[in-house]
């Protein structure tokens, strides 16, 4: 077999997101998956508890249907991320114990998502009021967790862990950003007119989406970088992730937000219709919130993907060819001196060698060296 120039003899991985350093390299696990699972479950528990408190509050002055519709997106997003995180931890455990078997890994991921979904649905049915909206929230939450488990069955586990990390950071940021909405409304010129309030709300929403996307991309890149360094410490021949993994990890939180919106509009359609039918203002509010969530997911998707990809690109160096010598490499002093001496000798030899025409003329005009026969 001939060796092509500029290529290393190491085999390449079939996975487009990984660059295998050896043919026997195994897929990398997702480090810290257990910690991510605990954090995601904690966030889901907080969302379920806050939703219950808002619905059962007698001083709210709003019906339980409207409050349930407003709280549903936060619960679904948290259930989607929690199902992905728990399923990722289960897949890591099964791969470590039984080896890298795709069917077993995917089955374990689905099982982890189902556990989260069934546990969430049971908690909602036991702690919420027994109404028609309770069953909708429980069923949609269970479906979101199971879908998240299916997402965690992907082969590139570090990329999934980066998506979970970035998604958790994005969800926490969105809740924390609500504390800065009022100052930003004043900053963007919100006044007494309805048009000024609408324009200020658009700029506040865009600012939130932009910062959330930047945070998602940086968190995804940071997790993948940490995962790579951890893998190299354990195995210097561990496969390196390529740029598609960073692109997918940065876009992952936005994809999860858009996926959560699809689950809300399909599984929670009856609840949204009930909330929109309460009044014209509720219908306008639900339509506006749905559009805002879609826009936010798209912004987070593209900004997060670009941020992670640019951060990864800054770590790359110029490509080198093994057959090409660097043009600016300094030549050793001894080699330069030998070359200079060789060039000087060649020049001296050329100047001392007589011209054949001049030698013939000198031979012809010298009577002492003339041919006696002539």
Image: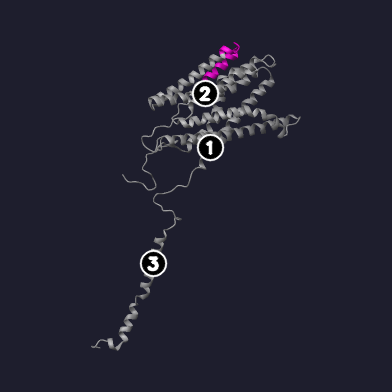
Instruction: Report the residue marked by disc 2.
Output: 38
- Give the structural element (helix, strand or loop) at label 2: helix
Looking at the rendering, in which quadrant would you find the N terminus? top left
Badge 1 vs badge 3, beta-carbon distance below 8 Å: no
Magenta residues, start to end: 125-143
Taking the spot 71% from the left edge, 34% from the top edge, the residue there is 187
Distance from label 1 to label 3 (Cα)? 56 Å
User: Is residue 186 shown to the viewer in this render?
Assistant: yes
| 90 w.r.t. 134: above or below | below
Distance from label 2 to label 3 (Cα)? 74 Å
> Would you say residue 138 sits in the magenta stretch?
yes
Of the two numbered discs 2 and 3 on the same chain, state the one appearing first in sequence.
Answer: 2
Looking at the rendering, in which quadrant would you find the C terminus? bottom left
**Principal secondary structure, stretch drawn in magenta:** helix
Residue furthest out toward the top: 130
Instruction: Report the residue marked by disc 3.
Output: 341
Of the two numbered discs 1 and 3 on the same chain, state the one appearing first in sequence.
Answer: 1
Query: Mark number for residue 308?
Result: 1
Query: Mark number for residue 211?
Result: none
Residue 270 image position (x, y, % from top left): 59, 17
Residue furthest out toward the right: 192
Circle 1 or circle 2, nearest the eye: 2
Of the two numbered discs 1 and 2 on the same chain, state the one appearing first in sequence.
Answer: 2
In the image, 87 versus 228, the foreground residue is 228
């Amino acid at each position: 077999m001939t060796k092509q120039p500029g290529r290393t003899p190491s085999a390449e991985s079939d996975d487009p997101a990984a660059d295998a350093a050896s043919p026997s390299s195994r897929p990398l696990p997702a480090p810290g998956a257990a910690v991510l699972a605990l954090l995601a479950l904690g966030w889901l528990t907080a969302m379920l508890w806050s939703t219950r408190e808002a619905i059962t509050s007698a001083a709210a002055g709003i019906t339980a249907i409207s409050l349930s519709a407003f709280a549903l997106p936060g619960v679904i997003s948290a259930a989607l991320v929690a199902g992905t995180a728990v399923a990722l931890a289960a897949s890591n455990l099964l791969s470590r114990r039984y080896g890298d078997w795709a069917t077993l890994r995917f089955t374990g991921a689905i099982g982890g998502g189902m556990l989260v979904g069934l546990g969430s649905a049971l908690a909602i049915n036991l702690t919420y009021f027994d109404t028609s909206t309770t069953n909708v929230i429980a069923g949609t939450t269970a479906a979101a967790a199971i879908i998240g488990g299916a997402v965690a069955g992907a082969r590139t586990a570090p990329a999934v862990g980066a998506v979970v990390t970035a998604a958790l950071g994005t969800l926490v940021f969105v809740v924390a950003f609500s504390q800065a909405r009022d100052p930003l409304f004043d900053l963007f010129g919100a006044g007494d007119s309805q048009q000024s309030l609408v324009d200020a709300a658009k700029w506040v929403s865009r600012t939130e989406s932009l910062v959330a996307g930047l945070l998602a991309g940086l968190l995804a890149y940071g997790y993948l970088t940490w995962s790579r360094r951890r893998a190299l410490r354990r195995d210097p021949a561990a496969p390196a992730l390529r740029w598609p993994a960073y692109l997918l990890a940065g876009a992952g939180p936005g994809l999860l937000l858009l996926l959560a919106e699809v689950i809300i509009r399909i599984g929670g359609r009856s609840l949204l219709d009930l909330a929109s039918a309460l009044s014209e203002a509720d219908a306008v509010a639900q339509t506006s919130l749905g559009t805002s969530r879609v826009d936010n997911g798209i912004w987070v998707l593209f900004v997060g993907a670009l941020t992670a990809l640019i951060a990864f690109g800054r770590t790359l160096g110029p490509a080198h060819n093994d057959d090409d010598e660097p043009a600016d490499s300094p030549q050793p002093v001894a080699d330069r001196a030998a070359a200079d001496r060789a060039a000087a000798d060649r020049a001296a030899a050329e100047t001392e060698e007589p011209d054949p025409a001049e030698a013939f003329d000198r031979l012809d005009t010298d009577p002492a060296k003339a041919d006696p026969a002539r």
